[in-house]
Amino acid sequence: MPAPPFADRPRIDALDKVRGAAAYAADMRFPGLLHAMTVPSPVARGRVAALETEAALRIPGVTRILTPADFAPTQRVADLPNSPRPGLVPEIAFRGEPLALIVAETLEAAIEGAEAVRVRIEGAPFSATVDSPGAAREPAPDVSTGDAARALAGASTIVEASYESPTQHHNPIELLSTTAVWADGRLLIHEGSQNAGAIKVAVARTLGIDPAIVDVKSATVGGAFGQKGWVQRQTALVARAAMLTGRPVKLVAPRGQIFHLATFRPLSRHRIRLGADATGRMVGVHYEVDQQNSRSGGFPANQYHDGAMRLYGIADYAGIAANIRTDTQAPGHMRAPYEHPACFAFESAVDELSYRLGRDPVALRMANDTRTDMHTGKPLSSRFLNECLQIGAERFGWSRRNPAPASMAAPDGTQIGWGVACGLYPTLIHPAVATLRIAADGSTRFAVAGHEFGQGIRTALAAVLTRELQIDERRLQILVGDTTAAPQHLTAGSWGSASALPLVVQAVARMRQAVAELLDGRRIAGTLHQQIATVRRPFLEVEVSQVGPGQDSAALQRMRAGGYAVTGPAYPDFTTMSYIAHFVEVRVEPRTRRVRVPRVVSIADCGRVVSPRTAASQVRGGVVWGISHALREATETDPRYGGFLNNDLAEYVVATNADVDEIDVGFVDEPDPLFNSIGLKSLGEVSMVGVSAAVANAVFHATGRRLRKLPIRVDDLL
Amino acid sequence: MQSFRLIRPRTAQEAVSAAAQGGAASRFIAGGTTLYDLMKLNIERPGQVIDITGIGELHRIETAGEELRFGALAPMSAVATDAVVSRDHPVLAEALAKAASQQLRNMASVGGNLLQRTRCPYFRNGAGGVYPCNKREPGSGCAAIGGLDRSQAVLGTSEACTAVSPGDWPVALVAVDAGIELLGPNGPRSMPVDALYRLPGETPQHEFTLAPGEMITAITVPRRNAGRLSTYHKIRDRESYAFALASAAVVLELEGDRIAQARVALGGVATRPWRAPAAEQMLAGQRLTPELALAAGHAAFRDARAGHHNAFKLELGARTVADALIIAAERRP
């Protein structure tokens, strides 16, 4: 039986966060702490011929300089989230690659030391962008179903267009920070991460030590968005420095360097042919996508199709994909990494189709609904996209829209446009283990795989725990992101809630059973705490585990070993996706052509909503980022030099409060009947999917200008 | 970032003497919003930093007389929200309020803001030998010319440099013929704000006409030049915390329904705060219509020269001037 609706509750850590009491990784203090700074490569490709460190070592406070000689040589492997990163190496694969690590008594000395290192480099030719000579196009496996060519040949209307989503960087406010402590034969790492378990294994591998002696803690993360899902290059460097100096070492990477160290959303180009029959049924799609990748990047290109092919009931879909290899650091996952750019392209094409057909864009979408995963033929466990569209259209006042482009204007000549677009995201699940401990002293501790990076997993866990158990919430401790408390998975892909919350239900049932066994028929009044106290036990602890539909204990073992074991969205008997519909109003100024977004209505189908407040906050954040993706953000590369030119928060323009106005969020809040005991699905990423298409569609409706390359800026509309 | 000597004088005279002793490696610091930034980027490497924030006399805001007088250390946020400035002199208040972020405006001083250095990304990002820049390393070349030049200047450029003068406040001050008071090794002097700025020419590393060791102590604004029919209109890539793609400071004086005098200055498009006399002449004696406003805007860009990606600034700049003129005219009581 799915859970009944959950009541609103405050964010469990809100007070700590606004008081500045929440402790992030860089806040951890250790006696004798040393500070580190890297020397980034000024070139995009080459080899270090010599590192001259004498001047740097003379700077007061500089204690040690790590060079490639301090690391065993490692093979560069395909760059994936959990891959071990190399230590310091003489070969330079991208601009900003760390060439040396300065360790000093103060941060200032470390910085001065880093600036004083002289590097002699033998440069090599490089390809900085997808259009640079030498950028190699490398086909990825096709993702196709049915016979798109035949279907398109029979289509009565075909839209054909190319779209481009630019290079973008995550820019969470919390920088990449690593603090490593080497003591008593153990290595302790504090780092803001979504993937503490992988750090444990990967750092051990890079340094040639046993993962069993490595502990990783990432209790509170100041924004992650996929950037912190990948094992960072710096972590093993800092850990090695701690081992060599015998003192705790901390590195907080400067933001300008993070643009070159962390992953990024790669530029992607989408060519779409979308065909419909005379009744307005979408019958076939031929969709080719190219994305920028690094030379050794493992971020797969074909996944752009996984969402797009399931958005409507289109039986014939040809999905072609390719990587374009360039000399950069590896691109990677950035919130809704594939679905977001793909739905910008695809939902723009659907909008173009609606005008070609003379159909209302909402009605056209609703008429192409499906109950089946067209890719696998399996039933969808739940799909309420049409409900999202219906509720959204009503709240937005869509029926008052004049369908003709450039037909709505304010008295001062400001053009008004209303656009719609949909999004979807797979509902995935990762195996996980949890322990619930109820103590006689009135405290409760729940430990599980997961990371709290602002999305509210602690709040959602507390919502289920406090509903299932009469416990004192002030004495409830929820441990996430801590490899000493529970094995940790990569918390990403919006699988955190589905992988953790049903474990609460299971743990509570197991706990009740354990208490019953303990009492052995005795009737004792009071709470579980009181019952445990009465029988003179300090605490009772139960462990539970969960795997995804179709997974067996091997997946759980992989997870316990720090491996990646996610499954979905196609399960043995069904496919599970989350959905959203966005309605956007834009206003385009008559002369200077600034685009403003005064209001957005977004309605999501994420199954049962467990934590209404943090869920709505997730959607608002996704919408803000979608607006920012559509109108603001792009990282620029000068092909002559490589690297990212606008590498700070002043010049990499993310939306500010002044750029967003009313965002009305709603949920269908219908539990998924098959996926898990609570009926919840994924939410974090689907929130932003489709927003940028809705903005671009609204700009078209306002101006009659179809803009297929993001971001849309005044330059495009003058 | 290297070690430096920190000096905290109590008077302007002490500050100037310290600067004279410190020589070329000496820098004054007020809010630090530019200097610290550039020190962190390893572009500024001062050997001596003179913290002038303890000089009480330089914080004063005086709005009683025919001339407004702002001590160089008055925070941008304080001048922007001053009762008289915000009520009677919108062009000044808006230029300050639309700059940077509230946190930065709280720290930054109105005097220091005049000396803000360019945001040209090639200038800021190149320390350590990545991008050549004639401003940072004279003679090394300019990476922006032929590079990603969307944000570069279209007015006042040279073969050596196209970096935009980033400020908003200086643009408003140039429009209203404001002056500055200076104190240097040879004593006090004053000059128009307009005379503070150089064109890049062949020596883009020299941006200001200050003599070595000279310090700005106050800004003076003839009250009648910055009246209520004025605005600072700023178009940028987002609605807060961004530098101008194009901006216009406009002040109108009307006689009946005709413009007696228009003051127009441009920001975000030029290598220095840019007065637009051609636009002003076209407007003088005319009735303002949307068509005339746009024509005046285009006149302001008659001598503009675009690079690869910034040609849009000619049209955007003209339209920004037009909108600014219309906004200012609508403030007629």
Image: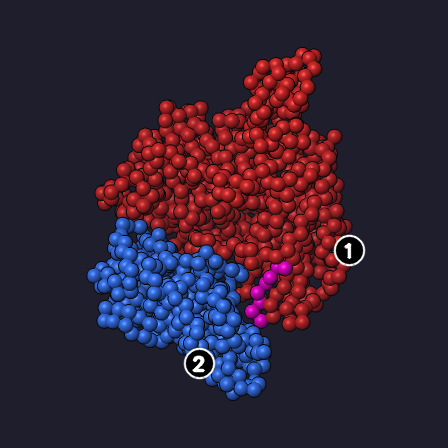
Chain colours: A red, B blue
How crowded is the residue under tag 2: few (<14 C-alpha within 10 Å), some, or many (20+)?
A: some
Q: Is residue B161 above or below residue B260?
A: above
Q: Quadrant of the N terminus of chain A?
A: top right
Which residue position holds label 1?
A278
At x 66%, y 14%, the residue is A519
- Which image quarter: residue A49? top left
Q: Secondary structure at mark 2?
A: helix
* Label 2: chain letter: B
Q: CA distance from mark 1 to mark 2?
A: 61 Å
Q: Is residue A216 above or below residue A696?
A: above
Can you give x and y, in whole percent of width and height, for residue A167 in the image?
50, 52
Which residue position holds label 2?
B277
Q: What amino acid is labelled 2 in the image?
A: Pro
Is residue A399 visible to us here? yes
Q: Secondary structure at mark 1?
A: loop
Q: Is residue A593 magenta?
A: yes
Q: Residue furthest front?
A: B64
Q: Is residue A350 above or below residue B275?
A: above
